[in-house]
Image: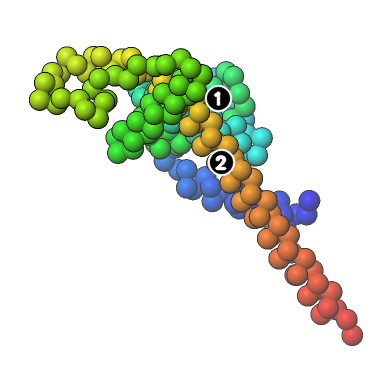
Amino acid sequence: MTADWVQERRRRVRLVKKWLKHLPRRSNVHRYPVLKWFGDSAKKRAYLWSFRSREMIPAIFLGMLVSLMPLVGVQMLVVTLLAVFLVRANLAVLVGLQWISNPLTMGPIYYADYQIGMAMLELFHLEPEVNPILRPDYDWSAFRWSHLADLVDTFPPMMIGGLVLGSFGGLIAVIAYKFLAKRSKASYQSVQQNKTSEGEGSEEP
């Protein structure tokens, strides 16, 4: 590995950190809700702030997995516990990916979780019962707010669907990351080889 490659890698890391400047860092982790509870532990773990592939890949996969599961309200707690105590993963990436699930996308994501979960249960012949409020022929004129409490039975299929959808999304994201990282490295090495060839050519009499 040449000195130029090391410098280029550091430059890319600085660029990524600039993109992630609004996300938690070792110096400001104590300012974030939930994360501040683990501030002291997080500051002692250097891998939480590393952008090496071995910390980025689990962060991308687990970040996608959790973001596509019906865990609204506890997502930050879940990813923080995973990063600090269970896996070696970049905390900023884990936290940033949770914004995939937001007030605008939450409805479609959870609906997809439910549909996928129901399909998985049917695949294993568990014959799940569709909640009446989610049926196409539901009589909305008879709707009562109390009916929303019945939606609690949608949680198990949503969790199953979230695991499937999140795992698939995480796998795709990791593959994309590896492809882009490999392509970036190959592109840089090609540029360096061209510079070396040009330098050798200019030295010829």
Say if residue 106 shows up in the picture: no
In the shown orientation, is residue 167 left or right of residue 122? Answer: right
Q: Which mark is residue 166?
A: none
- Residue type at the position of mark 1: Ala
Please report the residue visible at 61 percent of the width from the left and 36 percent of the height from the top: 57
Q: How crowded is mark 2: few (under 14 residues within 10 Å), some or many (20 or more)?
A: some
Q: What element carries label 2?
A: helix
Q: Which mark is residue 83?
A: 1
**Above or below for 196 versus 117:** below
Please report the residue visible at 34 percent of the width from the left and 31 percent of the height from the top: 111
In front here: 167 or 182?
A: 167
Q: How many marks?
A: 2
Q: Position of residue 22 (x, y in %)?
A: 41, 41
- Residue type at the position of mark 2: Ile
Please report the residue visible at 75 percent of the width from the left and 70 percent of the height from the top: 195
Q: Where is residue 115 in the image (x, y as percent from the top left)?
A: 39, 29
Model colouring: rainbow
Residue 161, picture quadrant: top left
Q: How crowded is mark 1: few (under 14 residues within 10 Å), some or many (20 or more)?
A: many
Give the label, 1 or 2, closer to the camera: 2
In front here: 170 or 184?
A: 170
Task: Name the residue tied to disc 2.
Answer: 172
